[in-house]
């Protein structure tokens, strides 16, 4: 929470000086001008883009939203998933959070989940599915540098991206805040694209008298 507040403060300072924040590099330069840590550039860029594209993302029906999940979230020792054309095919075995993310998303109406080893497969999927109109928005989970890169590329394609950073990055055993992912998945679905049942997934069932 403290980190988020200091990020917001830094963003406010950048807006106050009218800085050009249109690219990661521009953000980096602006940070150096106000003597802030340039390593925050990716986080600030992603936060600005998330805000800027939230409304556009909200307007896209769930079936056209792709969820990109990094393979590093898998339980690699026990994962029974097979690798296919579009990445790992999760069987929702319960050994990592990916199954929970997919199950929750499916109840909201999401149909496209891609568990990928990295950017090259994401690029291939976008190249195939964006021109066909099958992907019109994306939710991406990754480390800050990858998210910032994805924000830059997807904004060129006019695909609104909502990015969720990993809490612990790396090649294996990474961690994501699943509640954060669920919140982002629900954007724009308040009674519009999803059933009311889907939006109350977290509600506990009434006890049987
Ligand atoms: S939930 Fe899916 S991705 Fe995770 S370990 Fe099981 S099959 Fe693999």
Image: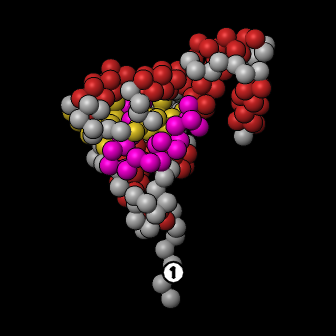
Where is residue 116? Give x, y as percent: 34, 30
Where is residue 109? Give x, y as percent: 35, 55
Of residues 135 and 104, which is closer to you in this image?
A: 135
Question: Over which residues does the magenta segment extend?
Answer: 49-78
Q: Is residue 180 left or right of residue 76?
A: right
- Outermost residue on the bottom side: it is 209
**Does 165 sit above or below residue 187?**
above
Where is residue 40? Give x, y as percent: 66, 21
Magenta stretch: includes residue 67: yes
Where is residue 51? Give x, y as percent: 59, 37
Magenta stretch: includes residue 112: no
**Does 46 sit above or below residue 208?**
above
Q: Secondary structure at mark 1?
A: loop
Of residues 41 and 96, which is closer to you in this image?
A: 41
Going 47% across and 48% down the picture, which residue do you hit?
A: 58
Q: Is residue 156 left or right of residue 82?
A: right
Instruction: Tell whether circle 1 marks a residue whose Cβ is less than 8 angstroms from ligand 1.
Output: no
Q: Is residue 147 left or right of residue 121?
A: right
Going 41% across and 33% down the picture, which residue do you hit?
A: 159
Q: Is residue 158 visible?
A: yes
**Does 181 sit above or below residue 21?**
below
Going 52% across and 44% down the picture, which residue do you hit?
A: 55
Q: Pick the quarter of the image with the N terminus.
A: top right
**Does 185 sit above or below residue 32?**
below
Give the class, few, some or many, for how many residues have Cα within 10 Å of label 1's Cα (few <14, many ≥20).
few
Q: How is the image coloured?
A: secondary structure
Identify the residue position indicated by label 1 in the image. Answer: 207
- Outermost residue on the left side: it is 85
Q: Is residue 175 visible?
A: no
Going 73% across and 11% down the picture, which residue do you hit?
A: 32
Of residues 88 and 85, which is closer to you in this image?
A: 85
Q: So how many labels did they put on this image?
A: 1
């Amino acid at each position: 929470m403290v980190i988020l507040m200091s990020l917001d403060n830094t963003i406010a300072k950048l807006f106050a000086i009218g800085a050009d924040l249109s690219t990661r590099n521009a953000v980096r330069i602006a940070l150096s001008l106000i003597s802030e840590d340039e390593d925050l550039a990716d986080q600030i860029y992603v936060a600005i883009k998330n805000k800027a594209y939230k409304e556009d993302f909200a307007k896209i029906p769930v079936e056209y939203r792709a969820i990109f999940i990094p393979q590093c979230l898998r339980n690699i020792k026990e994962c029974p998933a097979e690798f296919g054309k579009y990445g790992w095919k999760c069987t929702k075995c319960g050994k990592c959070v990916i199954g929970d993310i997919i199950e929750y998303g499916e109840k909201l109406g999401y149909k496209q989940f891609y568990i990928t080893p990295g950017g090259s497969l994401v690029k291939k999927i976008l190249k195939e599915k964006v021109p066909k109109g099958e992907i019109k928005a994306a939710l991406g989970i990754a480390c800050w540098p990858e998210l910032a890169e994805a924000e830059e590329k997807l904004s060129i394609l006019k695909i609104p991206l909502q990015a969720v950073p990993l809490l612990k990055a790396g090649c294996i055993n990474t961690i994501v805040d699943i509640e954060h992912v669920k919140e982002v998945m629900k954007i724009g679905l308040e009674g519009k694209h999803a059933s009311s049942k889907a939006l109350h997934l977290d509600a506990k069932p009434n006890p049987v008298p």
